[in-house]
Image (tube, helix red, strand yellow):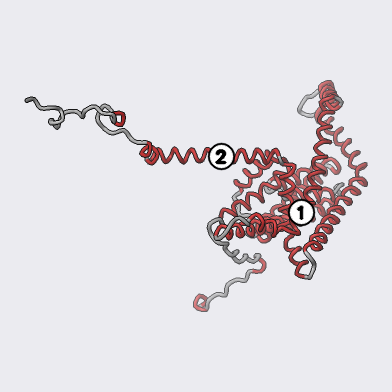
Amino acid sequence: MPSTSAERPDAPPAASGTDSAADPTGSPRPSLRDLLTDKFGQVAIRSGQVIVMLVLAGAIVFALVQLKLVVIPVLIALILASALSPVISFLRKRGLSAALASWATLIAGIVVFGGIITLIVFAVEGQWDELSSSAVEGVNQLQQFVQNGPFNISQEQFDSARDAVVGFVTSSQFGTGAIAGVSAAGSVLTGAVLAIVILFFFLKDGDRIWAFFLRPFRGYRRERGERIGRTAVKTFGGYVRGTAIVAFVDAVFIGAGAAVLGVPLALPLAVIVFVTAFIPIVGATLAGVLAALVALVANGPYIALLVVIIVIIVNQLEGNLLQPVVMANSLKLHPLVILVALTAGTILGGIVGAVLAVPIAAVSWAIVKVWNHPEQPDPPRKPPFWRRRKKATPASAEA
């Protein structure tokens, strides 16, 4: 009797309904579970998660950009409230209520800011005639240099370029841009009013607002939320206060130097130095270039060169002496990270975005560091070099 295939061990398996799970060589096909749990499957799943997170982050950024008229005032109010939190705490410890302390701080800030703006307006109004006449003379000198210098530009070419500029200014395209500028000014005014209102509520009820957002959490998640809130306020406040001190010193020395050299609009230039100091790396350079241009137009190249020297000296003293002492641990970011943050902030929010980008990056990094770990106490500050004492020489070494 001939043997069947089932009796022969070397015979291929009989056909059945499970043949779909095996390939022609007889090896079982990998299951879906095997495909997802091997090395390549893990990489694929992780890549898909990264793509989903990038898409979600892009959607969030797009939504924030579309709502920047609301987002930017909220961020400005949050940063200012963090910087003013010690003032609120001081006033409340003296017996003032939260509302009264908030009103006093807000009104004092508005008065100081309004006074600075008033001084700038009077300074510009008093020196505008002198500056405009100097600018006209400077333009004439520039025209003569261009025509008689090494560039070999004829009067006809110069007149053609001037006519092109005049034609653009009087064109409908320039008028459309002016209307857009008026609309932008209206948006800025609306945002400023909204920021003041939000700032008042942050000063008055900032802790209650954050506690409201943490209400759904319990246990370690609530502790993490409270830790994040304290870290954000501490980092924002330290950054703004430190930068304000550094900016004030820069503005005083550069403004005083410009005033001593007889450069017009010294006070507005000092205020511009103070504002641009909040943009790290590039802010001081822009302010120095503007001050040198004003001195070049109004006082000539020698005074402009002296202004540039003053700006360089002040920036070096600030970067090497003042900033390490004042800023301390408020901003621990690599310059490359600062440049990337500045670029991204400028693209998304313009000048305001450039100002807000660096403190937001600093706070984000500070939050990452305390996400799963408790807050670490700040290391003791290193005293300035003029307060450091030399170590006593041991007696054995002297011998």
Label 2, secondary structure: give it.
helix
Q: Is residue 268 above or below residue 207?
A: above
> 219 and 159: which one is in front?
219
Residue 111's spot in the image, x, y percent?
86, 56
Q: Is residue 301 visible?
A: no
Mark 1 or mark 2, which has the lower sequence index? 2
Q: Position of residue 146 (x, y in %)?
A: 80, 29
Above or below, comparing residue 63 to residue 324 in the picture: above
Q: Residue at x 77, y 63 (%)?
A: 98
Amino acid type at circle 2 is Leu
State whether residue 363 appears in this view.
Answer: yes
Q: Position of residue 155 (x, y in %)?
A: 84, 23
Name the residue tied to disc 2: 54
Relative horizontal placement of residue 170, taking residue 27 as reference (left or right)? right
- Secondary structure of the residue carrying numbered label 1: helix
Q: Quadrant of the N terminus?
A: top left
Instruction: Check the image and report above or below for 9 versus 130.
Output: above
Q: Which residue is mark 1?
A: 199
Estimate how packed mark 1 is, as few (under 14), some (14 to 19) or many (20 or more) residues with alpha carbons within 10 Å. Answer: many
Q: Quadrant of residue 374?
A: bottom right
Looking at this rendering, what residue extends furthest in the left direction?
1
| Marker count (numbered) | 2
In the image, taking residue 336 as reference, residue 144 lies left or right, namely right
The circle drawn on residue 129 is none
139, 168: nearer the viewer:
168
